[in-house]
Image: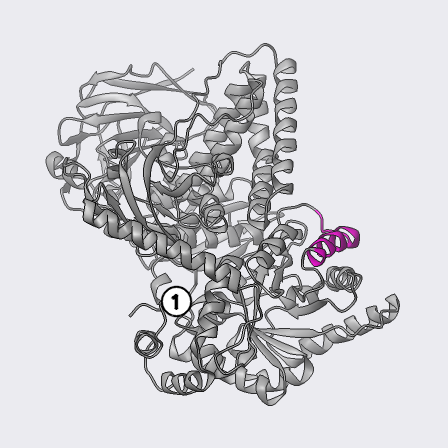
């Protein structure tokens, strides 16, 4: 077969792509090849051909050989961020080069100081019939040395471009600061991999297959360039949407990367880790003083060679079944947070692509353990390659599932080789959900992680268990010795390491006072809540399971103000039937012991897609079919849910809440269905029906909506993001997403006034209901019911009892005249003498 030798483009140390600190290259998303850690700043052409790509930052070039291969030389990792600094490109697109032609000169020292890594991948785009042979061994290599051979068939590459004829098209603007470079191109290719459609992208009068990242890079798409996406096939519309979403995801990743680099924990200067460490992220609020204890994980080794495909498949199937059973048991004894996390782990365990990948490796002779680990690591790398902060926080879950299965294959349950001293502050690079569950909560004072995410599943578990947790503390945490005294302030986001005796004494006194106040609050919370003038204020809890409901009651909640029923509908292949829903709702009703249960009807669509409910393609899902719109679009699902809710006993305990209402007609349609089903079931007890106020439209229509319902419930989180036109999950905008923004507060005031005028209870069930600075204003505006996380109930009840309603009315009126959330918060802090509000 014909062979083409590719030569080293620069001097350095040759290594496998596996060593490149970027999953795009390490997982060969752009193609196969080798990497070189350079010792000189000169890049030469590794073969003859035509220059097809010159990155506008000067850090990468691509050459098309006469045989049609695309070869990429990418100097360093994340060097696109340098914007061309330190690079001098000697060629341009269209230049014909010979082997050894000078391509790029770069400042090696400057890149070493500024870049993430100097590692330089040399990769060739995948093509049918192509094989890499005679790879250079790991070690020193000089420019011009043979690097690897391309062995290929005589059959040329299949044309990948898609013509306009019969194709769906979509025009998009590329908002990436650095254009369509290696990482976003690889992400786009990855997102299209499982979609049955031919896709090409047109820019600058040229067209390239969207199946080849290098071909996409060759288009030279830059910031604000417009591209035309062509798709043809059974899932053309889905492919167009996938391209748009991939580009949006890449923009978020880019923004997140800049944000992280600007706000990271800093660099280690080699000094011992003493004093306060800031730059951390708060994952679960709280305050604790304790002793450092490190997590020690068991080492899990696997044998590569299998004992035969049939035997290994049986072993993997058995291990997965054992893990599934173990996970199911864990979900049955925890609250909603634990159950949702377990459900996610089961999804990973049964993921078809993950299992198909493992199966394919077993068929090549690998052991079940080796195959499972390799398949899982491939999925982890794919998540990391997206750069999406939320997806990155799912890496821990995949690692957890990997460990569970490997342990099951070894005939073991998960061991915890960790003794927690009293008042332990657990230190680790990261923490898996199952490891958190295995910890002794009586000995655990707090958690501090070098990595981790503030919305990871471990963070959710820590918050539910009221364990203070800081994440993102970085390298300095790794130098903290076991037994070191620590002060964890997860209210302010600081970690004090080895504090001085006087500081330690103050911290211990503060922690003791907090514990005493919490105990007092929990006892007092068992009584009804009234303001100082005797006005009744109901404090309910947001729950998601029977165990949540029990915990809420023990915290003093007077009922459930918001039952999120999505847990029954998401992460599954079929919709829950009436019997399953009835059993779940009845268990929660029983746990509440006849106290009110406000059941929110299915709030799916948008950011909560369902596999069994494919929604029409939407330019902006957040503004499309979601909430009550989705329910009315699929009345069969809605009717089943309402029937199940109406059958809960005692009759009348369940109240129905409509999500994402925007007009009166939606309420009337649901009311008609409720009354029809009540007649079918011969249900005589009246059913209270409420509407969520989550959009400016609903707030402005609150007076008319109030005449159609029995109560109103303000969802402050969505109301804030829709009013301010800010995604509440956007990393750059999170700090500005304040429900006390004057515009949001005006809509809350309008809603509360409409409810009072109609004689309807107005509740708030969003995050602002647990904000001590907001509570006086909500009461002053007319809100008489708060629904909050169970852990916050005692403190909020204490705050309400300290407030005078007349003073709250005056304060709220003053705040409505102010120009910013900061001014509002400052005025509340000066006006309300309460320890829950910072002064």
Note whether 516 is above or below 656 in the view shown: above
Q: Residue furthest top?
A: 307
Confirm whether residue 204 shows in the render: no
Report the residue at 53% width, 16% height from top. 366
Which residue bears the numbered disc 1?
737
Q: Position of residue 644 (x, y in %)?
A: 77, 59
State left or right for residue 705 relative to residue 742: right
State left or right for residue 158 relative to residue 490: right
Report the residue at 24% width, 38% height from top. 476
What is the magenta range? Answer: 574-590
Q: Which of the 4 image quarters holds residue 806?
A: bottom left
Q: Position of residue 301 (x, y in %)?
A: 45, 17
Note whether 353 is above or below 741 in the view shown: above
Q: Main secondary structure of the magenta part?
A: helix
* Residue 379, magenta (yes or no): no
Location of the C terminus by quadrant is bottom left
């Amino acid at each position: 077969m014909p062979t083409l030798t590719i030569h080293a483009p620069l001097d350095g140390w040759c290594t496998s792509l596996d060593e490149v600190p970027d999953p795009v290259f390490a997982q060969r998303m752009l193609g196969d090849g080798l990497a070189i850690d350079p010792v000189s700043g000169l890049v030469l052409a590794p073969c003859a051909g035509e220059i097809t790509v010159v990155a506008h930052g000067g850090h990468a070039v691509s050459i098309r050989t006469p045989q049609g291969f695309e070869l990429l030389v990418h100097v360093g990792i994340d060097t696109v961020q340098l914007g061309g600094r330190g690079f001098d490109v000697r060629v341009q697109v269209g230049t014909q080069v010979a082997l050894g032609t000078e391509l790029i000169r770069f400042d090696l020292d400057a890149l070493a100081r500024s870049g993430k890594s100097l590692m330089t991948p040399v990769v060739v785009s995948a093509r049918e019939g192509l094989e890499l042979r005679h790879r250079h061994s790991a070690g020193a290599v000089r420019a011009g040395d043979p690097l690897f051979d391309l062995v290929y068939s005589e059959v040329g590459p299949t044309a990948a471009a898609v013509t306009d004829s019969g194709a769906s098209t979509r025009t998009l603007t590329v908002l990436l600061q650095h254009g369509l470079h290696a990482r976003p191109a690889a992400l786009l290719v990855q997102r299209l991999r499982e979609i049955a459609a031919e896709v090409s992208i047109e820019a600058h009068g040229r067209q390239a297959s969207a199946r080849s990242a290098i071909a996409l890079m060759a288009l030279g798409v830059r910031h604000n360039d417009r591209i035309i996406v062509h798709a043809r096939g059974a899932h053309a519309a889905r492919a167009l949407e996938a391209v748009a979403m991939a580009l949006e995801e890449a923009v978020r990743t880019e923004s997140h990367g800049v944000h992280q680099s600007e706000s990271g924990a800093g660099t280690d200067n080699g000094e011992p880790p003493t004093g306060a460490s800031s730059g951390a992220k708060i994952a679960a609020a709280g305050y604790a003083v304790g002793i450092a204890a490190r997590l020690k994980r068991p080492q899990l080794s696997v044998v590569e060679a299998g004992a035969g495909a049939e035997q290994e498949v049986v072993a993997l199937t058995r291990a997965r079944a054992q893990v599934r059973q173990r996970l199911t048991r864990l979900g049955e004894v925890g609250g909603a947070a634990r159950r949702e996390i377990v459900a996610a782990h089961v999804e990973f365990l049964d993921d078809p692509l993950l299992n198909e990948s493992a199966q394919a490796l077993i068929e090549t002779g690998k052991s079940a353990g080796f195959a499972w680990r390799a398949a899982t690591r491939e999925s982890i790398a794919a998540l990391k390659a997206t750069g999406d902060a939320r997806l990155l926080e799912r890496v821990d879950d995949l690692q957890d599932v990997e460990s569970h299965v490997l342990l099951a294959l070894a005939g073991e349950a998960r061991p915890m080789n960790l003794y927690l001293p009293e008042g332990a502050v657990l230190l680790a690079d990261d923490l898996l959900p199952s490891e958190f569950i295995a910890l002794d909560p009586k000995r655990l004072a707090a958690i501090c992680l070098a990595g981790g995410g503030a919305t990871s599943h471990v963070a959710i578990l820590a918050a539910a268990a009221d364990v203070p947790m800081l994440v993102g503390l970085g390298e300095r945490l790794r130098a903290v010795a076991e037994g070191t005294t620590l002060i964890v302030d997860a209210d302010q986001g600081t970690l004090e390491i080895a504090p001085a005796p006087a500081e330690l004494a103050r911290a211990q006194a503060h922690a003791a006072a907090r514990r005493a106040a919490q105990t007092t609050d929990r006892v007092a919370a068992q009584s009804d809540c009234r303001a100082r003038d005797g006005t009744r204020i109901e404090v309910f809890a947001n729950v998601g399971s029977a165990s949540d409901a029990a915990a809420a009651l023990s915290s003093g909640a007077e009922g459930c103000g918001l039952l999120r029923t999505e847990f029954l509908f998401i992460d599954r292949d079929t919709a829950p039937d009436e019997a399953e829903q009835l059993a779940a709702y009845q268990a929660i009703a029983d746990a509440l012991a006849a106290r009110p249960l406000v059941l929110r009807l299915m709030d799916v669509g948008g950011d909560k897609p369902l596999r069994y409910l494919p929604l029409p393609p939407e330019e902006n899902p957040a503004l499309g079919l979601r909430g009550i719109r989705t329910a009315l679009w699929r009345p069969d699902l809605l009717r089943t849910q309402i029937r199940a809710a109406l059958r809960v006993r005692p009759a009348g305990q369940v109240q129905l809440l409509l999500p994402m209402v925007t007009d009166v007609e939606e309420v009337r349609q649901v009311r008609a269905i409720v009354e029809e089903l009540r007649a079918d079931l011969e249900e005589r007890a009246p059913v209270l029906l409420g509407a969520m106020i989550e959009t400016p439209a609903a707030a402005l229509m609150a007076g008319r909506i109030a005449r159609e319902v029995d109560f109103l419930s303000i969802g402050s989180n969505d109301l804030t993001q829709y009013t301010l036109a800010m995604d509440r999950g956007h990393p750059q905008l999170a700090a500005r997403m304040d429900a006390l923004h004057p515009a949001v507060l005006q809509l809350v005031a309008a809603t509360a006034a409409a409810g009072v005028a109609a004689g309807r209870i107005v509740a708030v069930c969003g995050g602002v209901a647990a904000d001590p600075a907001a509570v006086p204003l909500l009461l002053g505006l007319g809100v008489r019911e708060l629904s909050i996380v169970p852990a916050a109930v005692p403190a909020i009840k204490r705050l309400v009892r300290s407030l005078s309603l007349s003073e709250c009315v005056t304060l709220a009126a003053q705040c409505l005249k102010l120009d910013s959330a900061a001014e509002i918060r400052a005025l509340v802090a000066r006006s309300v003498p309460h320890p829950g509000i910072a002064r």
